[in-house]
Image: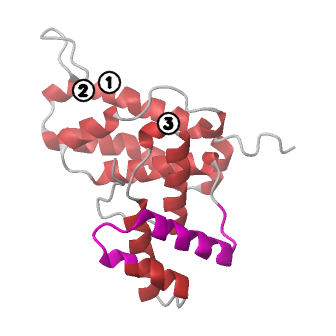
Amino acid sequence: MLIENKNYQYSLYEILCLMTYGEAFEAYRVDDYEKEIAKWAEREIISGNDSETVLILASFNLDKNPDPYEVKHYLSVYMRQEGIFMPNLRDSSIVWLRIKTWILLHIESVEEIELRLHEFPAYPLGYNSLLSSKLTWQYYHLYEELFDDWGPDYPSKASKMNELEIIIYVRDRLKPFYRILTNQDWVDILSGKHRNIP
């Protein structure tokens, strides 16, 4: 599986989150983190980062298929230099879902919306992914509500809507979730981070 782009510019933190999430849930693991790391490094150089390690990482963007071992090596060097650690699964699952939601909000193809909604898990992802599990369950039900077809007597809701209506409907349903996922206070509360605070 390849990392999704759709003109989304991944930060280094987001890439690390996707790596953590992919390690925990093999079905969502992708194989081309290296290219996005190189693109991130290139943007860093353009914005004024003068790190020699980042420059080396950026140079890999000249390769059609960057060597994953080389990229991993220099990424590890940079992370040690900057004191950066891999994010935990809780935070990574939030970032994974936020990016997936952003992409859904920018898709203009009903076929792709249907496919992407169908990919969301309909089961809990574990205690460390409490908020993500709650929201992916909602996404899965949105897929069922719109696209499940039970035969000629019970056609899918989407079959009675035109393409623009479906796109607007999905965006209207997902925007409140995206607002939650981009608000750290809501994320902390709904994921149970403050549960043990008096």
Q: Which residues are magenta?
A: 60-85
* Mark 1 Cα-neighbour bin, 10 Å: few <14, some 14–19, many ≥20: some
Q: Position of residue 85 (x, y in %)?
A: 66, 63
- Say which residue label 2 marks: 147
**Residue 113 position (above or below residue 80):** above
Does 103 sit left or right of 132 as displayed?
left
Residue beneath the point at 29% across and 54% down: 106
Nearest to N terminus: mark 1 or mark 3: 3
Residue beneath the point at 40% across and 50% down: 30
Residue beneath the point at 62% across and 46% down: 89
Residue 186 showing in the rendered view: no
- Say which residue label 1 marks: 144
Disc 2, SS:
helix
- Say which residue label 3 marks: 135
Which residue, as the protein is rendered here, is positioned at the far top? 153
| Residues at marks 1 and 3 touching, judged by CB atoms closer than 8 Å | no
Q: Nearer the viewer, residue 44 or 51?
A: 51
Kind of residue sitting beneath label 1: Glu
* Mark 2 Cα-neighbour bin, 10 Å: few <14, some 14–19, many ≥20: some
Q: Position of residue 86 (x, y in %)?
A: 63, 59
Q: Nearer the viewer, residue 160 or 66?
A: 66
Disc 1, SS:
helix
Residue 144 showing in the rendered view: yes
Q: Is residue 69 magenta?
A: yes
